[in-house]
Image (spheres, helix red, strand yellow):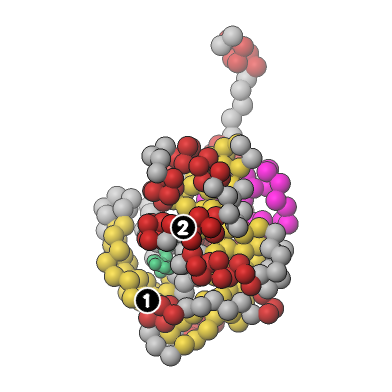
C-alpha cells in the first residue's frame, strides 16, 4: 500500500541536559520517513530553502524515500530551536523561523495522488485540507496537529477531523482540543468529532489507541538513557503507518500491532540526537524491539488464581 507524508523538512537546534546541536536534520516529514522507510517505501511532499544541505536529502533518498515531492525554493529553510527540561518531559520552543515554509502550498505530484495511506504532519490545517483535496481515494488518512493550530484554527481543524481516519496527538493536545482533562474522555470526544480512531501519545508513559469503542494501551519502551526526545511523535507515526503500509491490513488486531511498531520507532528516535539512531538500525533491530514489547506486556491469568477472586 503506497504511503505518503506531507510535513516539515527542517534544520533543528536542540538543547538537552546532555548536550546540544545546531542545524541538524529534523522536521516531521523527516522523522516520519526515517522510521517508516525501515518498513515500507515512503513518498514525501515538503519544501526546503536554497541553504538546505543536499547530503542528508541524498541519504534519505537512498533509503527508499521518494523525495520528488520536496521542492527547493529560493530563501531560508525552516528552522526550529527547542530546549528540554532536566527530566526531558517539557520542551520550550526558543525560536521558529519559517523561511520558505511560510508560503508552503503542498503540491502533490501526479505520481503520488493515488497514495492509499497518508500522513498529514503538523502543518496549518488549511494546508492539510488542501492536501486531501489532491489525493484521489486514500484508504486511511492520519493526521497530527499542535496547540498552536488548536487555538488559532479550531474551526478548520474540526472540519479536517471529519475527513480523516486517525488523529495522532499528545495528551496535552487531546486535552486542549476536547476541553477535558481526562484522556479517555478526551479520546471519546475526538472520535465523536470525526476520526474513526485516535492515538494519544503520553511521552515516556506510552500511548493509547481508542478505536471501535475499545481502548488499547502500549507502554513506552523502557530505555535507560533518553538523549533527545525531538521527533518521537513523528517517528511513532512513521512506525504506525509504515507497519500498516507493509502489511496492507487495517483489522483491529493489526492496528494494535501498528501501535507496537510506533512505540518501538519512537524509542529509537530518542536514543540519539536528530535522526542519528535510524542510520544505525535496520529491520532486524526493529523486529527485536517489537519482540521485547511482546514479553514486556505478556501475562497469563492462571485459572486457579482467577477463581480465588470469586
Ligand atoms: P515531535 O518531537 O515529534 O513533536 O517533532 C519535532 C519536529 O517538529 C522537529 O524536528 C521540528 O523541526 C518540527 N516542528 C517544530 N515546530 C513545527 C511547526 N510549527 N511546524 C512544523 N514542524 C515543526
Q: Is mark 1 within 8 Å of ligand 1?
A: yes
- Badge 1 crowding class, 10 Å Cα cut-off, few under 14, some 14 to 19, many 20 or more, is some
Q: Position of residue 305 (x, y in %)?
A: 59, 14
Residue 258 within the magenta-colored segment of the rendering: yes
What residue sits right under mark 2 in the picture?
155
Please, which residue is most extreme toward the front here? 155
Residue at x 71%, y 46% (from the top left corner): 251
Residue at x 57%, y 63% (from the top left corner): 119
> Residue 276 lies in what quarter of the image?
bottom left
Quarter of the image with the N terminus in it = bottom right
* Vertical arrangement, residue 282 with respect to residue 76, above or below: above
Which residues are drawn in magenta? 243-265
Mark-to-mark CA distance, 1 and 2: 23 Å
Residue 144 within the magenta-colored segment of the rendering: no
- Badge 2 crowding class, 10 Å Cα cut-off, few under 14, some 14 to 19, many 20 or more, is few
Q: Earlier in the sequence, mark 1 or mark 2?
A: 1
Of residues 72 and 11, which is closer to you in this image? 72
Q: Horizontal placement of 78 versus 250: left or right? A: left
Q: Position of residue 9 (x, y in %)?
A: 46, 74
What residue sits right under mark 1 in the picture?
98
Q: Secondary structure at mark 2?
A: helix
Quarter of the image with the C terminus in it = top right
Magenta span dominant secondary structure: helix
Q: Position of residue 204 (x, y in %)?
A: 41, 47
**Front label number (1 vs 2):** 2
> Residue 245 lies in what quarter of the image?
bottom right
Amino acid at each position: 500500500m503506497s504511503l505518503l507524508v506531507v510535513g516539515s523538512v527542517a534544520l533543528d537546534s536542540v538543547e538537552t541536559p546532555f548536550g546540544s546541536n545546531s542545524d541538524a536534520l529534523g522536521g516531521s516529514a523527516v522523522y516520519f520517513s526515517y522510521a517508516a522507510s525501515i518498513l515500507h517505501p515512503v513518498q514525501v511532499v515538503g519544501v526546503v530553502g536554497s541553504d538546505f544541505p543536499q547530503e542528508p536529502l541524498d541519504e534519505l533518498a537512498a533509503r527508499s524515500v521518494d523525495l520528488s515531492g520536496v521542492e527547493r525554493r529560493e530563501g531560508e529553510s525552516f528552522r526550529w530551536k527547542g530546549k528540554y527540561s532536566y527530566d526531558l518531559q517539557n520542551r520550550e520552543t526558543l525560536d521558529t523561523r519559517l523561511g520558505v515554509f511560510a508560503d508552503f502550498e503542498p503540491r502533490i505530484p501526479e505520481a503520488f495522488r493515488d497514495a492509499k495511506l497518508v500522513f498529514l504532519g503538523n502543518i496549518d490545517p488549511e494546508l492539510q485540507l488542501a492536501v486531501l483535496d489532491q489525493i484521489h481515494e486514500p484508504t486511511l488518512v492520519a493526521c497530527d496537529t499542535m496547540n498552536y493550530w488548536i487555538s488559532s484554527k479550531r474551526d478548520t481543524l474540526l472540519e479536517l477531523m471529519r475527513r480523516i481516519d486517525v488523529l495522532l496527538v499528545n495528551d496535552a493536545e487531546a486535552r486542549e482540543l476536547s476541553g477535558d482533562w481526562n484522556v479517555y474522555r478526551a479520546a471519546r470526544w475526538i472520535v465523536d468529532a470525526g476520526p474513526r480512531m485516535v492515538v494519544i501519545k503520553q511521552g515516556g508513559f506510552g500511548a493509547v489507541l481508542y478505536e471501535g469503542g475499545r481502548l488499547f494501551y502500549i507502554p513506552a519502551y523502557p530505555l535507560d538513557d533518553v538523549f533527545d526526545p525531538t521527533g518521537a511523535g513523528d517517528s511513532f507515526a512513521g512506525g504506525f503507518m509504515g507497519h500498516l503500509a507493509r502489511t496492507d491490513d487495517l483489522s483491529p488486531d493489526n492496528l494494535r500491532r501498528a501501535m507496537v511498531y510506533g512505540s518501538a520507532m519512537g524509542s529509537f528516535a530518542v536514543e540519539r540526537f536528530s535522526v542519528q539512531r535510524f542510520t544505525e538500525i535496520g529491520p532486524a533491530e526493529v523486529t527485536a524491539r517489537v519482540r521485547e514489547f511482546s514479553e514486556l506486556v505478556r501475562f497469563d491469568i492462571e485459572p486457579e488464581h482467577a477463581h480465588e477472586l470469586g
